[in-house]
């Protein structure tokens, strides 16, 4: 997202500056429908009220950006579409010249964000789709960052848990299409750095590492309260609401056996708003296991799954 060079010129008190063709009120103010060419080269065509842009209008910037939508007293306010200089586009709600409410942002790398905005930033519930990988983040955003409960969905597996500063943190689980879940926890660990980096950085860089704890059959994403064991349950038996709901199938067990080690996840190269690389942030290749340590590589999962089916 690039707002640089896309600030609108306030026309208040500038009725005699620039060019204007259109309606005026008795006081000589721009009032009604009109067309203006501002001193900085921008143009506006649409509704005016008491000398200010008010109602439906279209504002074109000299740098190629343009806004078409609703105005309230010279401010973008209501429904509108903004096409930015870099070609990205926002369609949705505005308040006091800022993206605010519900809207969709189309990035130049074909990624999209659909959801809530607050004070020009992604904030609330939203879905970010990564065009390059086909993955998507569905969950909570805080001040433009992925933070809170969310689900990161890939082509053949998904991760469900909490995020902080764009990275998974704390308890969560991976859900595989083969019909099983791997439960565990993301823990932050110090990242090795060179001497020069240590001098330049005051805060230690940390990366999340995955520690698996158990494997179960599929369960609902929204956890339900466990049911009390009935009198018909024999000794050592678990009630119908017990965690895990049974052991995984033979194929899942063969595929996931040995999940005892740690999984390292590299931090993303955010921000896409500046680098436009957000689509690579959670590429499946970044979620990798080391087979030598008893873990599994997601890239090898499809091959092993295919062999099992054959």
Image (tube, grey):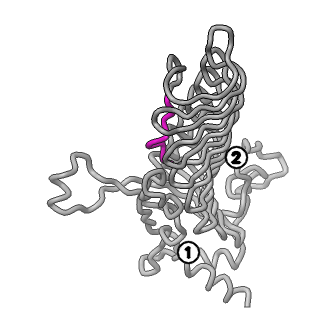
Q: Position of residue 153 (x, y in %)?
A: 64, 60
**In this view, 283 is above or below 41:** below
Q: Is residue 186 magenta?
A: no
142 or 114, which is in the foreground? Answer: 114
Q: Of the residues under marks 1 and 2, which one precedes in the sequence?
A: 2
Q: Main structural element of the magenta stretch: helix, strand or loop?
A: loop
**In this view, 241 is above or below 309:** above
Residue at x-position 49% and y-position 49%: 170
Q: Residues within 10 Å of mark 2 (few under 14, many from 20)?
A: few
Q: Residues within 10 Å of mark 1 (few under 14, many from 20)?
A: some
Residue at x-position 60% and y-position 37%: 59
Residue at x-position 62% and y-position 13%: 28
Residue 182, image quadrant:
bottom right
- Mark 1 sits on what residue? 298
- Mark 2 sits on what residue? 223
Relative to 14, 198 lies left or right: left
Q: Position of residue 202 (x, y in %)?
A: 21, 46
Which residue is situated farthest in the top direction here?
27
Number of on-image labels: 2
Instruction: Look at discs 1 and 2 and give the one toward the viewer.
Output: 1
Magenta range is 1-9
Specify whether residue 71 is in view. Answer: yes
Q: Identify the mark at residue 21; answer none if there is no mark.
A: none
Q: Position of residue 38 (x, y in %)?
A: 52, 32
Q: Position of residue 201 (x, y in %)?
A: 22, 50
């Amino acid at each position: 997202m690039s707002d640089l060079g896309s600030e609108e010129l306030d026309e208040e008190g500038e009725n005699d500056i620039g060019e204007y063709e259109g309606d005026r009120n008795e006081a000589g103010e721009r009032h009604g429908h009109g067309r203006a060419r501002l001193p900085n080269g921008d143009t506006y065509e649409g509704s005016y009220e008491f000398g200010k842009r008010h109602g439906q209008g279209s504002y074109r910037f000299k740098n190629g950006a343009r806004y078409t939508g609703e105005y309230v007293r010279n401010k973008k306010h209501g429904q509108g579409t903004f096409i930015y200089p870099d070609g990205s586009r926002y369609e949705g709600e505005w308040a006091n010249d800022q993206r605010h409410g519900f809207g969709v942002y189309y990035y130049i790398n074909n990624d999209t964000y659909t959801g809530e905005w607050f004070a020009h930033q992604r904030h609330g519930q939203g879905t970010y789709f990564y065009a390059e990988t086909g993955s998507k983040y569905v969950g909570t955003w805080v001040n433009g960052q992925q933070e809170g409960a969310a689900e990161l969905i890939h082509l053949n597996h998904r991760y469900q848990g909490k995020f902080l500063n764009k990275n998974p943190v704390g308890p969560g689980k991976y859900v595989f299409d083969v019909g099983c879940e791997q439960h565990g926890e993301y823990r932050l660990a110090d990242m090795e750095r060179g001497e020069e980096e240590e001098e330049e950085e005051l805060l230690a860089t940390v990366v999340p590492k995955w520690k698996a704890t158990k494997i179960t059959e599929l369960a609902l994403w929204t956890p339900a309260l466990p049911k009390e064991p009935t009198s018909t349950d024999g000794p050592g038996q678990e009630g119908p609401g017990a965690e895990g709901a049974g052991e995984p199938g033979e194929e899942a067990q063969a595929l996931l056996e040995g999940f005892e080690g740690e999984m390292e996840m590299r931090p993303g190269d955010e921000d896409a708003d500046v680098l436009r690389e957000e689509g690579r942030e959670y590429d499946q290749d970044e979620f990798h296991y080391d087979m030598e340590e008893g873990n599994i590589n997601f890239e090898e999962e499809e091959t092993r799954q295919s062999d099992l089916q054959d």
